[in-house]
Image: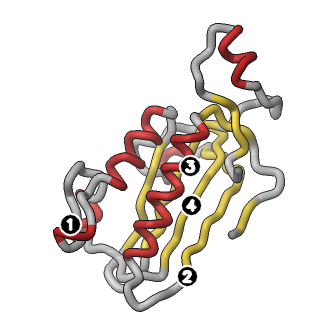
Amino acid sequence: LHLDPDVGVVRADQGQMEQLLINLATNARDAMPAGGRVHVRTANCNIADVSSAPPHILAGDYVSLSVTDEGEGMSADIRSRVFEPFFTTKPQDRGLGLGLSMVHDIVTESGGFITVDSESGRGSTFTVLLSRLATGTMTAPAEAAVAGGTPSRQIRAHR
């Protein structure tokens, strides 16, 4: 774990963020049949120059969550399909191909972005970017409900 102690606050559903992290960690583990390490990192980041960012990412302040494995990596063809529902490279009895699709949906529903960096034989890094809130104030679920909010809560990215 490489967790920034000063990581910002994001607005996201805690249960969905837990599911996202479980899916990414499980995927990383499965990518390393001979063993290896999984690295989980959190950090604050700012994207000011979108010309050097992937095309769909907007400028702004983000909290970054990345999961890196030392596994087999992916070819460009697999990488281009990795978030498709029911797409999997695993044997039929080992998965349905929904884990990364669910991760993509959670990130999108949270107003964030996800990228994958991988090459065959080099491992993979999945990076989630969620908008960092300007305030560090936590909102309790009951307060959000009274204020007409959703069940989503502001959570620290590393919890």
Where is residue 67? Give x, y as percent. Answer: 54, 65
Sequence order check, earlier mark of 1 and 2: 2
Name the residue that disc number 3 marks. Answer: 18
- Mark earlier in primary sequence (4, 3): 3
Check the image and report above or below for 34 versus 9: below
Q: Nearer the viewer, residue 158 or 80?
A: 158
Q: Amino acid at mark 4?
A: Ser
From mark 4 to mark 3, how far is it between C-alphas?
14 Å
Please tell me which residue is depicted at 37% across the width and 85% down the height of the picture. 33
| Distance between the alpha carbons at the discs numbered 3 and 2 | 20 Å
Crowd band around label 3 with a 10 angstrom C-alpha radius: few (<14), some (14–19), many (20+): few
> Disc 2 vs disc 4: Cβ atoms closer than 8 Å?
no
Q: In the displayed structure, does residue 140 sit left or right of residue 35? A: right
Residue tagged 4: 66
Q: Position of residue 125 (x, y in %)?
A: 48, 67
Q: Nearer the viewer, mark 4 or mark 1?
A: 4
How far is disc 3 from disc 1 in space, using C-alphas?
A: 29 Å
